[in-house]
Image (spheres, coloured by chain):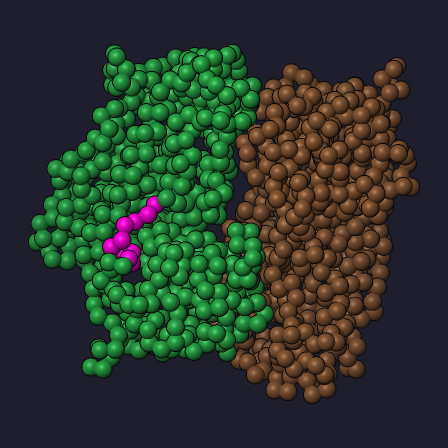
Chain colours: A brown, B green
Amino acid sequence: MEKYDIVIVGAGPVGLTLSTCLARWGYKIKHIDNRPEPTPTGRADGIQPRSLDLLRNMGLKRQIMAYEPAKVYEVAFWDPAASGIHRTGTWASCPKFIDARYPFTTLLHQGMIERVFIEDIEKHGGKIQRPWTITDFENDGKDANYPVQVSLAHVDGTQKETVRAKYLFSGEGARSFVRDKLGVKIIHKDPISHVWGVMDGVVRTDFPDIKMKCTIHSDAGSIMVIPRENNMVRLYIQIASSTDPDFNPRKSATAEEVQARAQAILKPYSITWDRVEWYSVYPIGQGIAERYTLDERVFMGGDVCHTHSPKAGQGMNTAFLDAVNLAWKIHHVESGFSPRSILKTYESERKLIAENLLNFDAKYAKLFSTRLPSAGEVAGATQANQMPAEENEFIKTFKASCEFTSGYGVAYNANTLNWSSAHPAQHPLFLSAGNGTTLRTGRILLPATVTRVCDANVVHLEQEIPLNGSYRFYLFAGEPEATKNAVKDLAAHMGKKSSFYGTFLHKNEDVDRYHERHNPHTQFLSICTIFNAPRSQISIAKQLPSVFARYNDHVYADDVWDQRVPDAKAAAHAKMGLDERKGGIVVVRPDGYVGCVVRLEEGNGTGEALDAYFGAVCGQKFGGERASL
Amino acid sequence: MEKYDIVIVGAGPVGLTLSTCLARWGYKIKHIDNRPEPTPTGRADGIQPRSLDLLRNMGLKRQIMAYEPAKVYEVAFWDPAASGIHRTGTWASCPKFIDARYPFTTLLHQGMIERVFIEDIEKHGGKIQRPWTITDFENDGKDANYPVQVSLAHVDGTQKETVRAKYLFSGEGARSFVRDKLGVKIIHKDPISHVWGVMDGVVRTDFPDIKMKCTIHSDAGSIMVIPRENNMVRLYIQIASSTDPDFNPRKSATAEEVQARAQAILKPYSITWDRVEWYSVYPIGQGIAERYTLDERVFMGGDVCHTHSPKAGQGMNTAFLDAVNLAWKIHHVESGFSPRSILKTYESERKLIAENLLNFDAKYAKLFSTRLPSAGEVAGATQANQMPAEENEFIKTFKASCEFTSGYGVAYNANTLNWSSAHPAQHPLFLSAGNGTTLRTGRILLPATVTRVCDANVVHLEQEIPLNGSYRFYLFAGEPEATKNAVKDLAAHMGKKSSFYGTFLHKNEDVDRYHERHNPHTQFLSICTIFNAPRSQISIAKQLPSVFARYNDHVYADDVWDQRVPDAKAAAHAKMGLDERKGGIVVVRPDGYVGCVVRLEEGNGTGEALDAYFGAVCGQKFGGERASL
């Protein structure tokens, strides 16, 4: 019986992201999908700012952008007016208070996004087996290493396969065989459900905001407008709601009916269609799976675990992050870096995000569906382009949710991975938000622009280590003279075989790693060093101990001015809230979220704190005691 | 006999650029090359900042960047020291005083660049016929429309073709059949010639600047280091010079000899090669063709017209600009926009640039070859990383030439296209550098970041009109209230059938141009309007007369802060040196160079000035008089 590291069911965003990561990291994957080809038209299309960071970190952003997606920088709000509708205001989709590298939403048809992942998987020797489906599975433990048996079949039933795997992942979408067989229930957070119509097409109109994302409330109903690649526009129209007196979840509408409705809503503007690329009507309830896994062998993610309205464009983005969160944890367990128990944090971290999403969505969907008072009844909303003094609840909710909807609101609670004062690792040198750093554990690392020393390239620090499954170790080394001894002491500590670093050194020393940039010593960790000094004054060989100097491509000068910290001499240090002279160490999880921040000090303290943190993460004791054995 | 608009000989950078432009604009092209396939390895590799702008304007930058080229931001200077060599300083390859969107040189093997063009040509239905060569040609005028007869043959002589064409272009490289047959002489500006060795490969070294561009002078000789894609390094070593006492232009050296020489020069650092991808030795003289065309039917460009040393990375970049300069002029003549006489400006404009290049190159090459005094003899050059108080002549020349070598120094002299006080068009409303504008005619338009009104995207204004062969008309409309009447008057003027605008309206009005963004009314011109106002306060339909409002995708808010003009309210207006309140009009040639700048005023003056400018460009009278006929 063929054995695989993982069987992945479903080649939508969540399955593809997981497959892409694990294929790159060398895992043997059986990936099936029950559709004969990738999504041909329609479905999800919004890539949030944070997701674009992620795609860039995976080296896929350029391929996405090659499709020339639409970019949404602002959302326009239209409300009822005396004669039809009028714009009451606009708001940035990712406002300036969010420190985003790409402060816009990228709109591209899901099929193109799937193709980008599929090409990458194929480049790494993988493939999607289509149209195949899962027919049975069991974690029977008959093989300790490959405890899950999975039965697969061609959708026409002509071919069958049974394989064993270390893991099974379901990215099947809202209807999931795996979830059903596990008996995992979907909890409906909000009893309200809706029937939506969605239409992609090319239009002619004099509506001035047709290239903007718009939410339009009119006396004739509500609509959402979303620009798309290839001069297309997507319209979302709510066709029925369970709050309607005569609600019928099977209520439908023809494309022509939806177009007529859109025409009525957009008055006094006109709109006609040159062509319709995709049209669909579907009921959407709000649901969340009670569990994401029962045994840390069979996992689920994406729409299998959470469904909600499409309006905030969160489905695909949540799926990406589900997959990445799981991918690196499986990788660390299988690499022997971490105990199996870290797999429990997949559910605890990702289910919280889904719950936040559903809470937001319920509120937003309800407000979106609420008919607003007509203009005659509204005070203050007369001057076009200006937000009425008293904003309506919908706009208020939208604004308050920008951080969440842009993807930067993801905040994982404290646990073994995300340090807090309650973490098993205790040491006086840990820094916490407001106390020596601005960074918050469990949140994404802030972006920062620096100059790479080896080639003088101006680069985005947060992107310098690709999504390679390694922890990211940022040694903010402050002023070289001030931290010289501290850096030397840390290097000496890390150089010990018993340290968190020394423990995971490559076993095979015969491999030629001269050209290895990110993982010259270990797959566990990649190191960046950032000096508060002009690039021309930094000498990697002279100023850094060999453990850090070896990462020759990852030494940076913090010498690029930043508008957000205009008075800082070292903007990256300043943004992280670290002492510009004395620096500090930021440990970032393989998925980009901050794990812990440690003061950089002379002596053993810094190394000990790091040993303690990684000791908890890795479930083993690092440092002095073992060294003295 | 088959007839073509143009026969292009040679598929190096100059031929491919010309072919790409003309293919997009709908011309029928016969394009041949005598090599069986694109450049497989080696040859040119440096794309200057200005060229990257151009490639982006052609929509090809993303494809170039997909190859992950190296980027050179700084150049390091190494000079003889007591024990080998030491770095005496570094300098930006495109310093901050140059307002460049991409302040770096992009290093990528010529074959990859050629492939990007070839794919684009194929997308537009063209192809390169290989390996074919030109065997004869004559501008015999036997067909008034297709005056040039060209004979072509497969390089193995088995196939032949004779065709007629409107134009023949030679991009054959330094050895040119066309140039020889025309009897055009190459003038050797500098009698000195050199033999160069160039080697691309993957190295191992402890030389700290191996990922930088370096010029290294040592007691063992001089070398230039250039980083490349795929972890490669290019080394240029001068093997012989006509100033050597025993100069032999056929002197050669083996790869091993060049490596040994590099090892000696780099001491005390070590260097070895993992692999050598390309190695070549070639003699280079400095030469410039006396003429680029004799009859404005048979043209030449690129290396056919100018050869020089490879050290400043100018060859391919000059070729790109030769081709674009010619492409739009042929297009305007063939479209009936301009008289045949504008073709004369190809030679006058491009030969001047080549002469400047050769003057620079002669000086630079000579200095590069000059052995510097050893460290013992040099005062002040002791502190590493700091430029010695008294810079040597080589470094001074390098610094002084940055604007030129980055491509932004290209300055075409005044002529019919580039307005000056001596231009045939005379009107009090023309502005000139220092007198109402900072822009200089014959120079590239300055970059500016603005917000596009229709979709709130933050965009690069100078890139908004693609290289579509149209003149670019930037209506800087200042504050809407202040310019309302002036804009209305200008629109009324342009709306007349006799104006420079009205004269070239599309003939066929039955074509559906609803989705046409850049050329809704005419192929002659594309219009952008930039208001000094926040985006949310601009209403295209209400604030602009229909001639401007029709360019719905080309209306911008000048509301993005710019570090270069930190106090300006309207940064784009300020950078162009235009009155932030009253605006002004900038006319840019299809290749991005400023043609003229005109004050925006109420009444007929602005329109008259523009009529006068375009009247000279187009060789016909525009404006009132014809209108009254």
**Residue drawn at the location 33% of the way across and 64% of the way down:** B430
| Residue A375 picture quarter | bottom right
* Residue B407 relative to residue A523: left or right: left
Give above or below for B45 relative to B298.
above
Residue A105 point in image, percent of width and height: 62, 58
Q: Which residues are magenta?
A: B410-420
Residue B432 point in image, percent of width and height: 35, 59
Is residue B223 visible to the viewer in this orientation of the structure? yes
* Residue B346 relative to residue B463: left or right: left
Camera-side residue: A374 or B532?
A: B532
**Residue drawn at the location 20% of the way across and 51% of the way down:** B344
Residue B29 point in image, percent of width and height: 26, 51
Q: Give the quarter of the figure containing the C terminus of chain B.
A: bottom left
Camera-side residue: A162 or B412?
A: B412
Q: Is residue B419 magenta?
A: yes
Camera-side residue: B146 or A167?
A: B146
Give above or below for A273 relative to A16.
below
Residue A321 point in image, percent of width and height: 72, 49
| Residue A528 picture quarter | top right
Q: Main secondary structure of the magenta part?
A: loop
Give above or below for B317 relative to A242.
above
* Residue B147 relative to residue A580: left or right: left
Is residue A141 visible to the viewer in this orientation of the structure? no
Count of numbered circles in the view: 0
**Residue drawn at the location 18% of the way across and 53% of the way down:** B166
Q: Is residue A367 magenta?
A: no
**Residue drawn at the location 69% of the way across and 65% of the way down:** A311
Give above or below for A492 relative to B461.
above
